[in-house]
Image: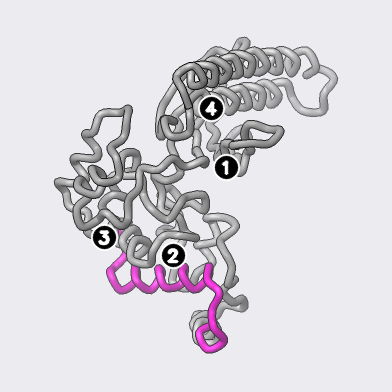
Amino acid sequence: MNRREDGFILVAALWMVAALAFLASAYASYALRTAPSASLPEERLRAEAAIRAAIDLCAFRQLAWPKVARPDAGAFSAEVGLNRVDVVYRSESARVDLNAAPRDLIAGLFAQLGAAPAVAGYLADRIVAWRGRLKDSDREREASVYIKAGLAYRPLGAPFDNAMEISLLPGMSPELAHRALGFVTIFGTGKIDPFVADPIVLAAVPGMTAAAANSFASSPSGAKPDASTLARMAGSAKDYVSADPNNYVRAEILASVGARRIRAEIVLKIAESGSSPYEILYWRDDFDGGG
Protein backbone atom coordinates (compact mmCIF):
# COMPACT_ATOMS: atom_id res chain seq x y z
CA MET A 1 0.00 0.00 0.00
CA ASN A 2 1.46 3.42 -0.95
CA ARG A 3 1.64 6.57 1.20
CA ARG A 4 -1.28 8.16 -0.63
CA GLU A 5 -3.53 5.20 0.21
CA ASP A 6 -2.31 5.21 3.83
CA GLY A 7 -3.13 8.90 4.07
CA PHE A 8 -6.60 8.39 2.64
CA ILE A 9 -7.36 5.63 5.16
CA LEU A 10 -6.15 7.74 8.09
CA VAL A 11 -8.17 10.78 7.01
CA ALA A 12 -11.28 8.63 6.54
CA ALA A 13 -10.82 7.11 9.99
CA LEU A 14 -10.40 10.53 11.58
CA TRP A 15 -13.61 11.70 9.92
CA MET A 16 -15.28 8.66 11.49
CA VAL A 17 -13.92 9.66 14.90
CA ALA A 18 -15.33 13.15 14.53
CA ALA A 19 -18.67 11.82 13.37
CA LEU A 20 -18.91 9.44 16.30
CA ALA A 21 -18.08 12.19 18.75
CA PHE A 22 -20.89 14.29 17.27
CA LEU A 23 -23.31 11.36 17.42
CA ALA A 24 -22.37 10.64 21.02
CA SER A 25 -23.08 14.24 21.99
CA ALA A 26 -26.36 14.17 20.05
CA TYR A 27 -27.36 10.95 21.82
CA ALA A 28 -26.70 12.58 25.18
CA SER A 29 -28.89 15.55 24.24
CA TYR A 30 -31.62 13.23 23.01
CA ALA A 31 -31.53 11.29 26.27
CA LEU A 32 -31.96 14.49 28.26
CA ARG A 33 -34.89 15.69 26.14
CA THR A 34 -36.72 12.37 26.31
CA ALA A 35 -36.01 11.56 29.95
CA PRO A 36 -39.27 13.02 31.37
CA SER A 37 -41.35 10.66 29.24
CA ALA A 38 -39.12 7.64 29.66
CA SER A 39 -39.58 4.88 32.19
CA LEU A 40 -35.96 5.17 33.33
CA PRO A 41 -34.85 8.05 35.58
CA GLU A 42 -33.12 10.95 33.88
CA GLU A 43 -29.88 10.32 35.73
CA ARG A 44 -29.75 6.72 34.50
CA LEU A 45 -30.25 7.88 30.90
CA ARG A 46 -27.57 10.52 31.25
CA ALA A 47 -25.15 7.99 32.71
CA GLU A 48 -25.79 5.50 29.91
CA ALA A 49 -25.40 8.20 27.28
CA ALA A 50 -22.08 9.29 28.77
CA ILE A 51 -20.79 5.71 28.95
CA ARG A 52 -21.86 4.99 25.38
CA ALA A 53 -20.12 8.14 24.21
CA ALA A 54 -16.95 6.97 25.96
CA ILE A 55 -17.26 3.58 24.26
CA ASP A 56 -17.64 5.20 20.83
CA LEU A 57 -14.59 7.38 21.35
CA CYS A 58 -12.53 4.48 22.66
CA ALA A 59 -13.42 2.32 19.67
CA PHE A 60 -12.58 4.98 17.14
CA ARG A 61 -9.32 5.81 18.78
CA GLN A 62 -8.46 2.26 17.79
CA LEU A 63 -9.94 2.49 14.31
CA ALA A 64 -8.11 5.73 13.55
CA TRP A 65 -4.97 3.64 13.04
CA PRO A 66 -4.09 0.64 10.88
CA LYS A 67 -4.29 -2.54 12.95
CA VAL A 68 -0.53 -2.99 13.17
CA ALA A 69 -0.14 0.51 14.61
CA ARG A 70 -3.06 0.57 17.05
CA PRO A 71 -2.20 1.63 20.59
CA ASP A 72 -2.48 -1.25 23.05
CA ALA A 73 -3.22 1.10 25.95
CA GLY A 74 -4.20 4.70 26.50
CA ALA A 75 -6.30 7.19 28.40
CA PHE A 76 -8.41 10.23 27.56
CA SER A 77 -11.10 12.53 28.94
CA ALA A 78 -14.02 14.15 27.14
CA GLU A 79 -16.98 16.41 27.81
CA VAL A 80 -20.28 14.88 26.70
CA GLY A 81 -23.03 17.44 26.97
CA LEU A 82 -23.15 18.39 30.65
CA ASN A 83 -21.26 15.24 31.61
CA ARG A 84 -17.63 14.21 31.65
CA VAL A 85 -15.99 10.84 30.99
CA ASP A 86 -12.50 9.71 31.96
CA VAL A 87 -11.37 6.56 30.20
CA VAL A 88 -8.43 4.19 30.59
CA TYR A 89 -8.23 1.34 28.07
CA ARG A 90 -5.94 -1.59 27.49
CA SER A 91 -5.64 -4.61 25.21
CA GLU A 92 -7.07 -7.84 26.60
CA SER A 93 -3.70 -9.42 25.83
CA ALA A 94 -2.59 -7.81 29.09
CA ARG A 95 -4.55 -10.60 30.85
CA VAL A 96 -4.23 -14.37 31.10
CA ASP A 97 -6.69 -16.05 28.75
CA LEU A 98 -8.56 -18.84 30.53
CA ASN A 99 -9.38 -20.54 27.23
CA ALA A 100 -5.99 -20.39 25.55
CA ALA A 101 -3.19 -19.80 28.06
CA PRO A 102 -0.82 -22.70 28.78
CA ARG A 103 -1.24 -24.53 32.07
CA ASP A 104 2.01 -23.27 33.58
CA LEU A 105 1.09 -19.63 32.88
CA ILE A 106 -2.26 -20.10 34.63
CA ALA A 107 -0.57 -21.83 37.56
CA GLY A 108 1.95 -19.01 37.72
CA LEU A 109 -0.82 -16.46 38.01
CA PHE A 110 -2.52 -18.24 40.91
CA ALA A 111 0.85 -18.55 42.64
CA GLN A 112 1.42 -14.82 42.24
CA LEU A 113 -2.02 -14.22 43.75
CA GLY A 114 -1.06 -16.10 46.90
CA ALA A 115 -1.95 -19.73 46.25
CA ALA A 116 0.50 -22.40 47.39
CA PRO A 117 2.33 -24.02 44.44
CA ALA A 118 0.39 -27.28 44.80
CA VAL A 119 -2.93 -25.43 44.91
CA ALA A 120 -1.96 -23.23 41.95
CA GLY A 121 -1.13 -26.30 39.87
CA TYR A 122 -4.30 -28.06 40.94
CA LEU A 123 -6.46 -25.10 39.89
CA ALA A 124 -4.62 -24.78 36.58
CA ASP A 125 -5.38 -28.45 35.91
CA ARG A 126 -9.06 -27.84 36.65
CA ILE A 127 -9.17 -24.92 34.20
CA VAL A 128 -7.48 -26.89 31.42
CA ALA A 129 -9.89 -29.79 31.99
CA TRP A 130 -12.94 -27.50 32.12
CA ARG A 131 -12.17 -25.88 28.78
CA GLY A 132 -10.92 -28.98 26.94
CA ARG A 133 -12.43 -31.86 25.04
CA LEU A 134 -11.47 -34.77 27.24
CA LYS A 135 -11.18 -38.42 26.35
CA ASP A 136 -13.70 -40.67 28.07
CA SER A 137 -11.18 -41.90 30.62
CA ASP A 138 -9.99 -38.36 31.41
CA ARG A 139 -13.57 -37.14 31.65
CA GLU A 140 -14.39 -39.82 34.20
CA ARG A 141 -11.28 -39.04 36.21
CA GLU A 142 -12.08 -35.33 36.21
CA ALA A 143 -15.69 -36.01 37.19
CA SER A 144 -14.43 -37.91 40.23
CA VAL A 145 -12.61 -34.78 41.36
CA TYR A 146 -15.92 -32.90 41.43
CA ILE A 147 -17.65 -35.77 43.20
CA LYS A 148 -14.99 -35.83 45.93
CA ALA A 149 -15.43 -32.08 46.34
CA GLY A 150 -19.16 -32.62 46.95
CA LEU A 151 -20.22 -30.77 43.80
CA ALA A 152 -23.36 -31.77 41.91
CA TYR A 153 -22.07 -30.60 38.51
CA ARG A 154 -19.22 -31.65 36.25
CA PRO A 155 -16.66 -29.74 34.16
CA LEU A 156 -18.12 -28.15 31.07
CA GLY A 157 -15.64 -29.58 28.57
CA ALA A 158 -15.96 -26.39 26.50
CA PRO A 159 -14.47 -22.89 26.56
CA PHE A 160 -15.31 -20.58 29.43
CA ASP A 161 -18.25 -18.30 28.56
CA ASN A 162 -17.49 -15.93 31.43
CA ALA A 163 -14.39 -15.46 33.55
CA MET A 164 -16.54 -15.69 36.69
CA GLU A 165 -17.01 -19.40 35.98
CA ILE A 166 -13.66 -19.99 37.71
CA SER A 167 -15.60 -19.68 40.99
CA LEU A 168 -17.22 -23.05 40.11
CA LEU A 169 -13.93 -24.93 40.14
CA PRO A 170 -13.28 -27.35 43.00
CA GLY A 171 -10.66 -25.97 45.35
CA MET A 172 -11.23 -22.36 44.26
CA SER A 173 -11.86 -20.11 47.25
CA PRO A 174 -14.13 -17.07 46.79
CA GLU A 175 -11.26 -14.79 47.83
CA LEU A 176 -8.84 -16.20 45.26
CA ALA A 177 -11.47 -16.12 42.52
CA HIS A 178 -12.19 -12.46 43.31
CA ARG A 179 -8.49 -11.56 43.12
CA ALA A 180 -8.02 -13.50 39.88
CA LEU A 181 -10.86 -11.76 38.04
CA GLY A 182 -8.74 -8.64 37.67
CA PHE A 183 -6.09 -10.54 35.73
CA VAL A 184 -7.92 -13.11 33.58
CA THR A 185 -10.01 -12.91 30.43
CA ILE A 186 -11.78 -15.02 27.83
CA PHE A 187 -10.85 -12.56 25.07
CA GLY A 188 -7.09 -12.93 24.92
CA THR A 189 -4.78 -14.80 22.59
CA GLY A 190 -3.04 -17.25 24.92
CA LYS A 191 0.06 -15.06 25.03
CA ILE A 192 0.73 -11.97 27.12
CA ASP A 193 1.47 -8.51 25.78
CA PRO A 194 4.35 -7.65 28.13
CA PHE A 195 4.24 -3.93 27.34
CA VAL A 196 0.83 -3.43 28.95
CA ALA A 197 0.50 -6.37 31.34
CA ASP A 198 0.22 -5.77 35.07
CA PRO A 199 3.38 -6.58 37.06
CA ILE A 200 1.54 -9.52 38.67
CA VAL A 201 0.83 -10.99 35.24
CA LEU A 202 4.40 -10.43 34.09
CA ALA A 203 5.71 -12.16 37.20
CA ALA A 204 3.42 -15.13 36.43
CA VAL A 205 5.01 -15.72 33.01
CA PRO A 206 7.30 -18.78 33.16
CA GLY A 207 10.92 -17.79 32.63
CA MET A 208 10.26 -14.06 33.11
CA THR A 209 13.15 -12.47 34.99
CA ALA A 210 12.94 -9.28 37.02
CA ALA A 211 15.31 -7.61 34.56
CA ALA A 212 13.14 -8.53 31.58
CA ALA A 213 9.96 -7.41 33.35
CA ASN A 214 11.58 -4.07 34.19
CA SER A 215 12.69 -3.59 30.59
CA PHE A 216 9.12 -4.08 29.37
CA ALA A 217 7.67 -1.80 32.03
CA SER A 218 10.15 0.97 31.21
CA SER A 219 9.80 0.72 27.42
CA PRO A 220 8.52 3.95 25.89
CA SER A 221 5.06 3.88 24.36
CA GLY A 222 4.81 3.90 20.60
CA ALA A 223 6.26 1.55 18.03
CA LYS A 224 6.78 -1.97 19.28
CA PRO A 225 9.87 -4.06 18.55
CA ASP A 226 9.90 -6.71 15.89
CA ALA A 227 9.58 -10.37 16.80
CA SER A 228 13.31 -11.01 17.08
CA THR A 229 13.87 -8.00 19.35
CA LEU A 230 10.90 -9.02 21.51
CA ALA A 231 12.27 -12.55 21.85
CA ARG A 232 15.66 -11.17 22.85
CA MET A 233 14.06 -8.91 25.47
CA ALA A 234 11.93 -11.75 26.88
CA GLY A 235 14.72 -14.32 27.05
CA SER A 236 13.47 -17.70 28.28
CA ALA A 237 9.93 -16.28 28.53
CA LYS A 238 9.77 -15.63 24.79
CA ASP A 239 7.25 -18.40 24.04
CA TYR A 240 4.68 -16.84 26.36
CA VAL A 241 4.67 -13.25 25.10
CA SER A 242 3.55 -11.45 21.97
CA ALA A 243 3.13 -7.85 20.91
CA ASP A 244 0.71 -8.67 18.09
CA PRO A 245 -2.44 -6.50 18.00
CA ASN A 246 -5.58 -7.85 19.65
CA ASN A 247 -9.07 -6.79 18.54
CA TYR A 248 -10.35 -6.98 22.12
CA VAL A 249 -10.06 -3.91 24.33
CA ARG A 250 -11.11 -3.38 27.96
CA ALA A 251 -12.10 0.15 28.97
CA GLU A 252 -12.53 1.44 32.50
CA ILE A 253 -14.81 4.46 32.42
CA LEU A 254 -15.58 7.05 35.08
CA ALA A 255 -18.68 9.00 34.08
CA SER A 256 -19.34 12.22 36.01
CA VAL A 257 -23.09 12.90 35.81
CA GLY A 258 -24.06 15.81 37.96
CA ALA A 259 -22.86 15.05 41.46
CA ARG A 260 -22.61 11.32 40.79
CA ARG A 261 -19.59 9.34 39.69
CA ILE A 262 -20.46 6.11 37.86
CA ARG A 263 -17.77 3.57 37.14
CA ALA A 264 -18.14 1.16 34.23
CA GLU A 265 -16.03 -1.64 32.82
CA ILE A 266 -16.54 -2.52 29.16
CA VAL A 267 -14.97 -5.06 26.81
CA LEU A 268 -15.14 -4.23 23.10
CA LYS A 269 -14.35 -6.21 20.01
CA ILE A 270 -13.04 -3.91 17.30
CA ALA A 271 -14.48 -5.04 13.97
CA GLU A 272 -12.35 -5.47 10.87
CA SER A 273 -15.44 -5.55 8.68
CA GLY A 274 -19.20 -5.62 8.86
CA SER A 275 -21.92 -3.07 9.47
CA SER A 276 -20.81 -2.06 12.98
CA PRO A 277 -17.31 -0.82 13.82
CA TYR A 278 -17.34 -2.56 17.18
CA GLU A 279 -19.27 -4.96 19.39
CA ILE A 280 -19.83 -4.67 23.14
CA LEU A 281 -19.08 -8.04 24.71
CA TYR A 282 -19.21 -7.11 28.38
CA TRP A 283 -20.71 -4.21 30.31
CA ARG A 284 -20.69 -3.74 34.07
CA ASP A 285 -21.40 -0.50 35.91
CA ASP A 286 -22.08 0.53 39.50
CA PHE A 287 -24.95 2.94 38.85
CA ASP A 288 -27.24 0.91 41.12
CA GLY A 289 -24.57 0.49 43.74
CA GLY A 290 -23.24 -2.89 42.62
CA GLY A 291 -21.43 -4.31 39.68
Specify whether residue 125 is painted magenta.
yes
- The answer to which of marks 4 and 2 sits earlier in the sequence is 4
Please report the residue visible at 55 percent of the width from the left and 29 percent of the height from the top. 59
What residue does disc 2 label? 173
What residue does disc 3 label? 206
Quadrant for residue 13, please give it: top right
Amino acid at circle 1: Gly
Disc number lying in front (1 or 4): 4
Quick one: SS at disc 3?
Answer: loop
Task: Say if mark 3 contacts mark 4, CB within 8 Å.
Answer: no
- The answer to which of marks 1 and 4 sits earlier in the sequence is 4
Q: Which residues are drawn in magenta?
A: 114-138
Mark 3 Cα shell of 10 Å, populated few (<14), some (14-19), many (≥20): some
Prevalent SS, magenta region:
helix
- Numbered marks: total: 4
Q: Is residue 96 above or below residue 57?
A: below
Q: Position of residue 163 (x, y in %)?
A: 52, 55
Q: Position of residue 119 (x, y in %)?
A: 34, 71
- The answer to which of marks 1 and 2 sits earlier in the sequence is 2
Is residue 32 visible in the rendered image? The answer is yes
Disc number lying in front (2 or 3): 3
What residue does disc 4 label? 63
Give the distance between the C-alpha atoms of the residues marked 4 and 2, in whole angstroms: 40 Å
Disc number lying in front (4 or 2): 4
Q: From the viewer's perspective, is 120 left or right of 287?
A: left
